[in-house]
Amino acid sequence: MSAPGAERVAVILLSGGLDSATCLALAVADGFTPVALSFRYGQRHDVEVEASRRLAAGAGAEHVVVDIDLRTFGGSALTADIDVPKHDDVAELDESVIPVTYVPARNTIFLAYALALAEVRGAADVFIGVNALDYSGYPDCRPEFVAAFEAMANLATRAGVEGAVPLRIHTPLIDLTKAEIIHRGIALGVDYAPTISCYDPDTAGRACRRCDSCLLRAKGFHAAGVADPTTYQP
Amino acid sequence: MSAPGAERVAVILLSGGLDSATCLALAVADGFTPVALSFRYGQRHDVEVEASRRLAAGAGAEHVVVDIDLRTFGGSALTADIDVPKHDDVAELDESVIPVTYVPARNTIFLAYALALAEVRGAADVFIGVNALDYSGYPDCRPEFVAAFEAMANLATRAGVEGAVPLRIHTPLIDLTKAEIIHRGIALGVDYAPTISCYDPDTAGRACRRCDSCLLRAKGFHAAGVADPTTYQP
């Protein structure tokens, strides 16, 4: 346990979307000194790294950006030359099927880097904004995946051998609806204007309105009774 | 199970050292179609990527090299400006202490990429040449770490959701001494001349003779009664 008043550093995975922006605010509200970690991973929507930068600055967080190139492997509509599926209505989403926007092992890779950064900084806490409701059906957003990663992480590092404070992976959004996430964020003063949720934004960072992620976001803001400050393509 | 005669692809983590070279040969001997995966991770010893290229070519394996930059994080003598410890004798090594050459979460990151590549290629098998004897005391070389990673990996991917063949992480060297590894490799025709084990080689790829890894390698060749074809610095 930390001594009273001791600084507790947490690594927060920050994608630039509304979930991770809320997660960052929750970590700060919990008293952690935040180190935000983002990736430039060859995604179509590189504008999300700029969104992350603005969100980290707004939260007073240090921001670490790592370049990784998942395009080497391909296999996803987000990193390869595959069309991002579009729909006219959120009811068309089928969460029983893993969509082509799934990036193979993405959260495993992101959490592995978070683990490395946490170890170097002496942090015992990592935050990830995964969500088991209102999500796109990705296997690596499920609670059982996160629990298994945490168990593995505690065998992977110096802390696991030397008996330091175990690493904890926090998933404060896991059981919340999109509307609940938005309400929590607004209560904490999160500005959702810089956030980008779209899988296929234009170069100005404007959302497409019709990908899975845009549809889930719009549904969430509607259910929350809050106006979405995002900017859409004309 | 695969149909008789069906191609079975395996991803083999290939560092360019003697362990991973032997691991690659064992995967080929097991009938797998090998895809070797190496990293350019800001290590001092970049010559090991060239060694990997030669070893993959020698084994007829496809070779994928991924650029990742662990120098962003620092925290290790292999990636930051920290001296690699040198010793005069292998008896000076203290395996009860994790040495400064440990790179935080390195094997977690490497295996995460291997998982991604395996998923994209439809491979259910990953080989890693970790070894619980004659090793440098790294936490992420222990069998319990590998088992936990395998459990996590099977929740992380499409296969975990869709009920495909579970991913298996093979560690064929885990219980072997360095001498036994060398004997297995020689029996399979591995040419150890291109392999590089040194943590601090010069720019010509010549080994320092006095780092932990050089000392363990020399001890292994001596115990195996085999001449080490490695080239040392004068």
Image (cartoon, coloured by chain):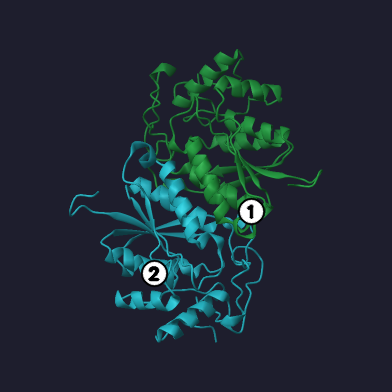
Chain colours: A cyan, B green
| Mark 2 residue crowding within 10 angstroms, few (<14) / some (14–19) / many (20+) | many
**Label 2 sits on what residue type?**
Ala
A150 or A81, nearer to the observer: A150
- Residue B177: give x, y in percent of width and height: 55, 22
| Three-letter amino acid code at the position of disc 1 | Glu
- Choose mark 2 or mark 1, whichever is in front: 1
Task: Report the disc number at residue A21.
Answer: 2
Question: Dot 1 corresponds to which residue?
Answer: B119
For residue A14, say whether it is visible: yes
Find residue B133 and name its label.
Answer: none
Residue B42 in percent (x, y) is at: 48, 43
Residue drawn where x is 41% and y is 41% of the image: A157
Residue situated in front as seen by the camera: B112 or B14: B112
Dot 2: element: helix
Instruction: Give the residue at x 69% y 52%.
Output: B122
Residue in the picture at 67% in, 22% down: B186
